[in-house]
Image (spheres, grey):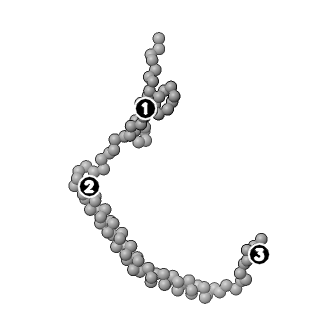
Amino acid sequence: MSPKAPATLDVACPECGATLKIDVATASVISHTPAPRKRTFEDMEAAAQHMRDQDERKESLFRQAVDAEKNKEDVLAKKFAEAMRKAKETPDTGKPFRDFDLD
C-alpha cells in the first residue's frame, strides 16, 4: 500500500524567502506568508546617525538647487549669445521646405 500524498505543499520562495502553501489537487496557491523583514539598523544610534546623514544630504541638494537657480539667468544668456553667434556665422541660404515638396 502506498503512503498517502499530502493535500498541500509548503514551498519556500528562493528569491524572497516567502512561504507558499499550494493545493496539490488544483495546483493553485492557497496562502502566502511573506518573509520576515530584516532589520535595517542594529540599534537606535545607527538609525539616528542615518537620519542625520540624510538631513545633511537633503540640505546639500537644496543648496545646489538654489545656486543653480541663481546662475540660471547667466547660463541661459550665454547659451543664447552662443546660438546667435552660430546663426550669424552660418546663414541659411536654402529655400525653406514645404510639406508637399518632400513628397
Give x and y (percent) for residue 40: 30, 50
**Circle 2: element type:** helix
Give x and y (percent) for residue 69: 41, 77
Front label number (1 vs 2)? 1
When the figure is inspected, residue 63 is found, relative to residue 29, above or below; the finding is below
Q: Earlier in the sequence, mark 3 or mark 1?
A: 1
Assess whether mark 1 and mark 3 are in contact (beta carbons under 8 angstroms): no
Assess whether mark 3 and mark 2 are in contact (beta carbons under 8 angstroms): no
Assess whether mark 2 and mark 1 are in contact (beta carbons under 8 angstroms): no
Residue extending furthest toward the top: 1
Q: Earlier in the sequence, mark 2 or mark 3?
A: 2
**Circle 1: element type:** strand
The residue type indicated by label 2 comes to Ala
Q: Residue at x 45, y 82 (%)?
A: 73
Whole-angstrom CA distance, mark 1 to mark 2, is 36 Å
Which residue is the site of mark 1? Answer: 21
When the figure is inspected, residue 94 is found, relative to residue 39, above or below; the finding is below
Asked whether 26 or 51 is in front, the reply is 26
Which residue is the site of mark 3? Answer: 101
The residue type indicated by label 1 comes to Lys
When the figure is inspected, residue 55 is found, relative to residue 25, above or below; the finding is below
Q: Residue 42's mark?
A: none
Asked whether 89 or 83 is in front, the reply is 83
Q: Residue at x 45, y 17 (%)?
A: 4
The residue type indicated by label 3 comes to Asp
Quadrant where the C terminus lies? bottom right
Q: Residue at x 47, y 33 (%)?
A: 29
Q: Quadrant of residue 46?
A: bottom left
Q: Earlier in the sequence, mark 1 or mark 2?
A: 1
Crowd class of label 1 (few under 14; some 14 to 19; many from 20; radius 10 Å): some
Which residue is the site of mark 2? Answer: 47
